Amino acid sequence: MRLYGREFASRLLLGTALYPSPDILAACVRAASPALVTVSLRREGAGLRAGEGFWSLVRDLGVPVLPNTAGCHTAREAVTTAQMAREVFDTDWIKLEVIGESDTLQPDVFGLVEAARILSGEGFKVLPYTTEDLVVAERLLEAGCEVLMPWGAPIGSGRGLNNLFGLRALRAHFPEVPLVVDAGIGLPSHAAAAMELGYDAILLNTAVAKAGDPAAMARAFAQAIEAGRTAFLSDPMEGRDMASPSTPVFGRAVLA
Ligand SMILES: CC(=O)[C@@H](O)[C@H](O)COP(=O)(O)O
């Protein structure tokens, strides 16, 4: 998979929040070999020494870091957080989140486009957490984003793909743009379904961190994403309403 000109072997982007322990997080990363791990500057900054410990743990994982602007509610807050993240994590990649509504954690798409334009202008590689809205997608591309990350469902809900029609339409409208389903994935089958639609990658966190056996679930997600991608590339059959015998028979059985 290619994002902003960089090649990644994996199509899984894994969040680093909510794990029962740092060791379990490390086991999940080993089990799934994600392309990137997301980290929240606000979380690390709040913990001070705990944050430093967490940062060295993440560095030791040996996986490229994608800082995010989780918890930001305005474009200005998100831009400042991204600028600080660039210093702290020494990367110009940013997962841009501007939250607009607290029940659904739905993105504020107006603030998102504004922040994306500013950050792209400053040389950031912006990966925006957005909805499946086609017009917003167009604006984000105009603002300089080379990747789009529509939600599957509200963050942490585990509902899967809430709007299959919208996600399919987005894929069809932007065949050349790398698209990552971000948030709301609850099961490996949800991830596989998104990959079967032709999505390029999946970003998830809660479903792995909150599983009874997080490392096993991380591995299951990696396998499902791989399987979904292979299925997409295999040109799946068209669904149909009526039965079609899968064992054609010729002539009549002769019964003695
Ligand atoms: C880790 C991160 O960036 C989250 O904000 C992301 O959207 C994941 O969502 P889930 O926890 O629903 O997988």
Image (tube, rainbow, N blue to C red):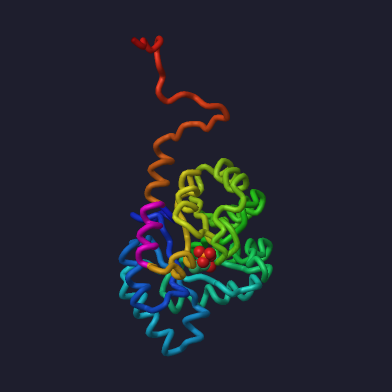
Residue 18: percent from left, percent from top: 47, 75
Name the residue located 57 percent from the left edge and 76 percent from the top edge.
Answer: 80
Is residue 94 at least partly visible in the picture? no
Q: Quadrant of the C terminus?
A: top left
Residue at coordinates 54% horizontally, 61% vertically from top-left?
158
For the stretch drawn in magenta, what is the main secondary structure?
Answer: helix
Q: Residue furthest front?
A: 256
Picture quadrant of residue 50: bottom left
Q: Is residue 221 magenta?
A: yes
Q: Is residue 137 visible?
A: yes
Q: Position of residue 157 (x, y in %)?
A: 57, 64
**Residue 186's spot in the image, x, y percent?**
50, 60
Membership of 52 in magenta stretch: no
Front-most of 64 and 233?
A: 233
- In this picture, is 33 found above or below 210? above
The part of the chain drawn in magenta is: 215-224
Q: Nearer the viewer, residue 38 or 105?
A: 105
User: What residue occupies the far bottom of the structure in this picture?
Assistant: 49
Q: What is the number of callouts on the image?
A: 0
Residue displayed at 44% across by 67% down: 211
User: In the rendered image of this protein, does residue 41 appear above or below residue 36?
Assistant: below
- Relative horizontal placement of residue 37, taking residue 129 as reference (left or right): left
* Nearer to me, 51 or 113: 51
- On screen, 50 above or below 106? below
- x and y percentages locating residue 37 in the rendered image: 41, 67
> Is the residue 151 above or below the residue 255 in the image?
below
